[in-house]
Amino acid sequence: MSAHLTVVDHPLIQHKLTLMRDRNTPSAVFRQLLREISLLLAYEALHDLPLTTKPIETPVAPMEAPILQGKKLVLVSILRAGNGLLEGVLELVPSARVGFIGLYRDPETLQPVEYYKKLPEGMPERTAVVVDPMLATGNSVCAALDRIKETGARDIRFMSLLAAPEGVAAMKARHPDVPVFTAAVDERLNDHGYIVPGLGDAGDRMYGTK
Ligand code: URA
């Protein structure tokens, strides 16, 4: 199995992430940067997808050409901020199926409460990529992964933009079989469950709701 945590610290990602962290970056630019980073993260998170071959004819010669093997991928967005990462990954894998899990964080207990779930059929045979930009306490992601595993899904990866050490530890303890891909691991969480230095509330930054 691949490493549990992969920090994709490509210079382009780090540069774009700095722009995203800046409180003066407007929502439209924030969304665009998130989309761009999601392409680069997905490139890494999907590097080991299995391939098969099929016979084709180029204008010059016949060949056995590589194509992706197996059922179509499923991308699972944890609402609502997950949709920011989803857009870019869908561009890279346009035939992927898409699922959604809606969880909000109770501001007092910081525990996730589910309000929506829709996943495609055939989950046990699909590679699933779960996306949420902020791995903070890890409570939401771990709860979403519990729901996803109930469907029989086995090959699951998690993609986030930013992580806190607490979230990475929670993932490792509760879902050690799910590799985590992120652009950076920050210092810590504050008392409100925000990542420090972080970038604030990803959903609010994306949609201008604050
Ligand atoms: N969710 C966010 O949007 N930001 C954080 O810093 C933590 C959780």
Image: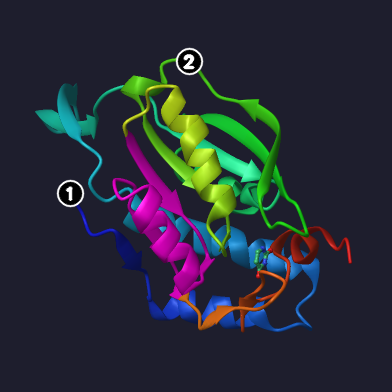
User: Which stretch is magenta?
Assistant: 155-184
Quadrant of ligand 1: it is: bottom right
Identified by mark 1, the residue type is Met
Colour option used:
rainbow
Q: Is residue 62 magenta?
A: no
Q: Which mark is residue 1?
A: 1
| Res 134 seen here | yes
Which residue is at a point 56% across and 62% down the rendered structure image? Answer: 137
Which residue is at a point 48% across and 69% down the rendered structure image? Answer: 166
Residue 43 position in % (x across, y down): 36, 55
Judged left or right of residue 191, residue 154 is: left
Residue 126 position in % (x across, y down): 36, 26
Residue 86 position in % (x across, y down): 57, 46
Q: Which mark is residue 102?
A: none
Disc 1 to disc 2, C-alpha distance: 25 Å
> Regarding mark 1 in the picture, which secondary structure is present there?
loop
Q: Is residue 170 magenta?
A: yes
Q: Which mark is residue 121?
A: 2
